Amino acid sequence: MPERNDEKTILVPVDFSSFSEAALLRACQLAECMDLRVVILHVVHDPAEMPGYYARMAKDSNLVRIEDVAREMLDKFVDDMINRHSELECVREARTMLVVGLPVGRILEVAEMVNASMIVMGSQGRTGLDHLLLGSKTEQVVRLSPIDVTVVKK
């Protein structure tokens, strides 16, 4: 694992959804107020509840590394955010990271590695049986994180 960064940051895990966009916008507001940098993180995984999540973005039928497709998706997400919110310098200056693994554990590891002051995450707000069966990655991060976690609803 890379060496720990001493610069304070806000970590924003994204899954490229509108919930992630809302979280990134809120993180930028907070970063500006607290003079912090933003790190945009995507954890590469192919969840059981959505097999083929990355495959739908592959441009052709040739075999491609899932990490390469995920990197393209992350770059497109950030580019789209810059285009839609050109007034936000925070997004243009944000550092992006792509890691592989189980999202909750990797989010917490990266938060420590980048010396995050807080984590800002979007939430779909699943309830009922969906929440019981699938759990909530955001809720798990909130429970396990030693630093503040801000949950943003769209």
Image (spheres, rainbow, N blue to C red):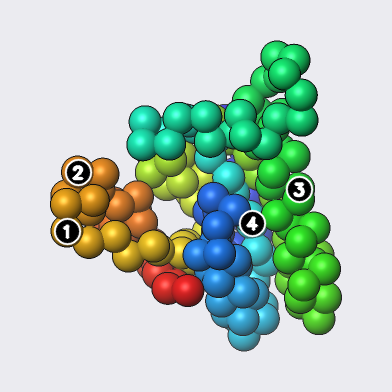
Answer with mark 3 or mark 1, whichever residue precedes in sequence.
3
Type of amino acid under label 4: Val
Quarter-of-image position of residue 36 = bottom right
Work out how far the residue at label 4 is from the one at label 2, CA to CA, in angstroms: 30 Å
Residue identified by numbered label 4: 39
Q: Are marks 4 and 3 in contact (CB under 8 Å)?
A: no
Quarter-of-image position of residue 30 = bottom right
Residue identified by numbered label 3: 75
Front residue of 27/110: it is 27
Query: Whole-percent x and y of residue 95?
Result: 72, 54
- Secondary structure at badge 4 equals strand
Type of amino acid under label 2: Leu
Work out how far the residue at label 3 is from the one at label 2, CA to CA, in angstroms: 31 Å
Q: Are marks 3 and 2 in contact (CB under 8 Å)?
A: no
Mark in the foreground, 3 or 1:
1
Residue identified by numbered label 2: 133
Q: In this view, does 12 lie to the left or right of 91?
A: left
- Secondary structure at badge 1 equals helix
Work out how far the residue at label 4 is from the one at label 3, CA to CA, in angstroms: 13 Å
Work out how far the residue at label 1 is from the one at label 4, CA to CA, in angstroms: 32 Å
Residue identified by numbered label 1: 128
Residue 133, compared with residue 144, is above or below; it is above
